[in-house]
Image (tube, helix red, strand yellow):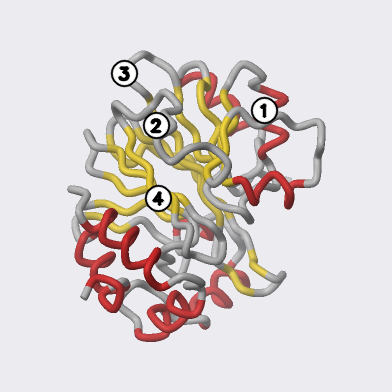
Amino acid sequence: MSDETVIREVTPGIWTFSKPFARFGFWPIGGRSTAVQLRDGGVWLLASTPLTAETKAKLDELGPVKYIIGADAVHHLFLGDYKNTYPSAKLIAPVDTIARHGDGTLQFDGAWGRDSPETKYGFEEEIDHCYFTGFKNKDVAFFHRSSKSLIEADLLLNLPAKEQYSKSNEVTSTLLLRFGEFGPFSWLHRKFTGGLAVDQDAMRRDAKIVSGWDFNRIIPCHGDIIEGDGKRAWNDLYKEFLE
């Protein structure tokens, strides 16, 4: 079976690995991992898709993987595969990920929610992070300053996931489009996001932190990448928390 992963350089130094993924087995939201080449030659990786042979080949080409990142409590399925393949890399994820993952042998080098909020993991000179304690999935948003890119998992979706299903058969692609738009400018997405807020004050605090970052691109785990209009997309989706 051919690999359906779409591998591309989004902007110099940032590569994405996009592939089909259906939430609950029927909602085609797609999946995406994102790799950032750091100035020291290492690679920072938000790992959310399978470690296929093609994915590994590209990562090895980019440089040594130094950080393996779990973006939230539910994006944990493949963390063990990446850590076993790149044992010297630091594995960092929200503390809820550790319990959900269920593999007691998997050692995490850092955990948002367990570590002090002032903890530095080593990549902060290039990538900022904001842990959303008030969001149900305990997501972490990341800001790669030099490329002005916001990298995140479930905090913002931009469906339909056209790129992630671009190598799929025609039947799947047709089904994807029937689900219509579920993006940051839709009232339904705002309602959905509001429903995932478990602490309103914390959500307001963290939504404002991200809104204050100087990004114009959003690289989500689910759906197409937003180019040039990222800040407006974020502010529109989170406007009730930014007021």
Between 181 and 77, the residue placed more toward the observer is: 77
* Residue at left offset 51%, top offset 16%: 64
From what the image shows, is residue 9 above or below residue 74? above
Dot 4 or dot 1, earlier in sequence: 1
**Rendered image: mark on residue 83:** 1
Q: Residues within 10 Å of mark 4 (few under 14, many from 20)?
A: many
| Residue 114 placement (x, y as % from top left) | 58, 42
**Rendered image: mark on residue 36:** 2
Dot 1 or dot 3, earlier in sequence: 3
* On-image quarter of the C terminus: bottom left
Name the side, left or right, on which 2 lies relative to 110. right
Dot 4 or dot 2, earlier in sequence: 2
Which SS class for mark 3?
Answer: loop
Dot 2 or dot 1, earlier in sequence: 2
Q: Total of numbered circles in the picture?
A: 4
From what the image shows, is residue 189 above or below residue 134? below
**Rendered image: mark on residue 39:** 3
Q: Nearer the viewer, mark 4 or mark 2?
A: 4
CA gap between label 4 and label 2 equals 14 Å
**Rendered image: mark on residue 6:** none
Amino acid under disc 3? Arg
* Residue at left offset 41%, top offset 78%: 189
Q: Residues within 10 Å of mark 1 (few under 14, many from 20)?
A: some
Disc 4: which residue: 141
Name the side, left or right, on which 17 lies relative to 129. right
Amino acid under disc 4? Ala
CA gap between label 2 and label 1 equals 17 Å
From what the image shows, is residue 49 above or below residue 40? below
* Residue at left offset 51%, top offset 72%: 198
